[in-house]
Image (spheres, rainbow, N blue to C red):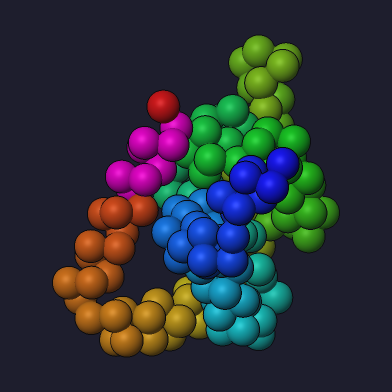
Amino acid sequence: MEDKQATLGLEKCRQIGRSCGCYNLRRAARVITRFYENYLRPSGLKPTQFSVLMAVHARGPIPLTKLADMTVTERSTLTRNLNVLEKKGFMKITEGTDRRERLIEITDIGREVLINALPLWEQAQAHIEKELGKDRMENLLDNLEHITAIARN
């Protein structure tokens, strides 16, 4: 037992903390989410709600399963989030051609909220891009896309 505990020494723990992709991505996700929340607060939208509204607006009526896949969100989690947006009048959830299919569509109210939130998102985005620089921002987005593809397989 002592040998096994020695392999998990303080330096090993620090090294894992510095190099663990999962830990560092989750840590960055939490802080960037708070950052965007602060900018979006006047709109009444959370970053996740903004992203879902934007995705649905960009793709028109979209099946729930496709939206979940596109946003890499568990269907049950996405359904809970969509129900909140539907209660606020921002989304409409209807039955698809198959009774089991649900189609998600943005409403006029949702589109208006999204339009009002857009300048706030643009301010947050501009701040991040300014601090990172254009090349680092592009590299970050490319790397995140690549990580997502690796982890999905």
Residue closer to the observer: 124 or 18: 18
Q: Which residues are magenta?
A: 145-152
Task: Give the image location of residue 38, x and y in percent.
Answer: 62, 84
Report the side of 32 relative to 34 (left or right): left
Point 38% across, 80% down: residue? 128
Residue farthest toward the right in the current orientation of the protein? 87
Q: Is residue 82 above or below residue 141?
A: above
Task: Give the image location of residue 116, x and y in percent.
Answer: 55, 77
* Quadrant showing the C terminus: top left
Residue closer to the observer: 112 or 42: 42
Task: Give the image location of residue 144, x and y in percent.
Answer: 36, 53
Can residue 84 be seen?
A: yes
* Quadrant showing the N terminus: top right
Point 23% across, 72% down: residue? 136
Kindly report the secondary structure that dominates the magenta region of the rendered protein.
Answer: helix
Q: Is residue 92 above or below residue 128?
A: above
Q: Is residue 146 magenta?
A: yes
Q: Is residue 25 above or below residue 132?
A: above
Task: Give the image location of residue 70, x and y in percent.
Answer: 48, 38
Q: Is residue 58 magenta?
A: no
Point 23% across, 65% down: residue? 138
Residue closer to the observer: 13 or 22: 13
Point 51% across, 66% down: residue? 11
